[in-house]
Amino acid sequence: MSHLRAVLWRIWRASIFSTLLFPVFHIIRACSWLVPRDENIWLFYAWDGFRFSDNAKYLFLYVHANRKDVRPIWLTRSRSILHALRARGYRTEMVRSFRGLYYTLHAKLLIHDGVVVPPVSYWISGGLCSVDLWHGCPLKRIGLECTLTSFERWLTSRKLIHAWLVLSRPWTVRTEGYLVAPGKMWKDIYSDAFKISTERLWIGGHPRNEALVRPVRDSDIGTDMWQLARMRANKAANDKTIVYMPTFRNRVHNPLLNADRGFGELDHFLGDHHASLFIKFHHEKETAGVPYSHIHFVASSSDAYPLLRHADVLMTDYSSVFFDFLLTGRPIVFFPFDLQNYIRNERDLYFDYDRMTPGEKAYTLEELMKCLGKVLAGHDAYRRERQELLKRVFDHETTRVCVEMCEKLRRISDAPTCNITFKT
């Protein structure tokens, strides 16, 4: 309780500080519009600055290797990422450093994956064009269409609170810049979820998917190298590799975390089938904390895509990762053990679950092992359904996504203002 009070006090203190000083901050932001911006400086930022992963990562790597007319700079809050990228020759700056603030003030583009302009830099970002690559094709509701708690509904309905947020923390309520959707079927969903005009939304695919179909230089940065080495060893030994990536939950306990029965029984099953299971949870605390012979835990902060390229089977529930995995042509096993509870208490879905998930489905541990056994034995009854869904999900050839995206980004950066519109 004392820890909770301390956290609430820090939030309240920061809010009061922002409220008292927001007239000064707004003057600073207005002045930042007067600073000339360099159309050749593009900033990249992901996962609140604590990870080197996702779409922003792969577009950054592509730009660095192929666009000599651009100076790409990765912004981070992690010193380990800073040192890892600089060791490979990449321009990287801490968000709060002098050079990080300098580039925020002078760059023309900020390319990110679903986060707002870093709050510490928002007030000097006037004229900086934001491009949101987002981080997945949504099966579950996203953005403003997420299921709200009663407190959140009360909070968002109060005009006075909303007005205070607009003035003191505008990055939390405004949608500025551009948004990239992976295919036409997602256009209306993205527009409604983020309240953005379709003229500022373009169809562009996911840069990260290139790592699923071919090796990407330096993609190992930000990846759990220990588990990547294990996957490669698996392949060399002709053993099967299964990757389990469940979506985030607030309230529900995953049955596999019952170490006495879930993991133990599954570990024995995997040994009998010459397979290994690699689990990537959203939080490190979700791991079982005990060693198993055939079950391995990937660091939650790891980039999953260099690992997924080595997966023979993907296992998931409502995570958008399965849409990307369709590109590999390999089977998917769905484990929606809490489907109705998830829809009722966590997030509703955009689509009928059974129709949108082409793969074996299990709701209990016994069913899961049965489904995995079928897939590991070579039975793939959903190949055609996966191919049909793939045609609907993505409109761009995977290896052309970065090329075409950079052409649009160049149009935006060369324009005097961030008012370029796109037909979708």
Image: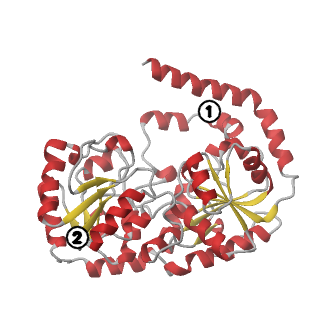
Residue 414, image x, y percentages: 79, 71
Label 2 crowd (10 A; few <14 / some 14-19 / many >=20): some
Q: Is residue 34 left or right of residue 104?
A: right
**Residue denoted by label 1:** 161
Q: Earlier in the sequence, mark 2 or mark 1?
A: 1
Q: Amino acid at mark 2?
A: Asp
- 16 lies left or right of 125: left
**Disc ID at residue 152:** none
- The answer to which of 267 and 186 lies nearer the viewer is 267
**Badge 1: residue crowd in 10 Å (few <14, some 14–19, many ≥20):** few
Q: Residue at 29%, 42% (x, y): give it.
A: 252
Whether residue 229 is visible to the viewer of this picture, yes or no, is: yes
| Callout 1 secondary element | helix
259 in relation to 11, above or below: below
For the N terminus, which image quadrant? top left
* Up/down of 155 relative to 304, above or below: above
- As measured in the structure, the alpha-carbon distance from the residue carrying label 2 to the one carrying label 1 is 56 Å
Query: In the picture provided, is 233 more to the left or to the right than 35?
Result: left
Tell me, for residue 239, which label it has, or none: 2
Of badges 2 and 1, the one in the foreground is 2
Q: How does the figure colour the protein chain or chains?
A: secondary structure
**Callout 1 amino acid:** Ile
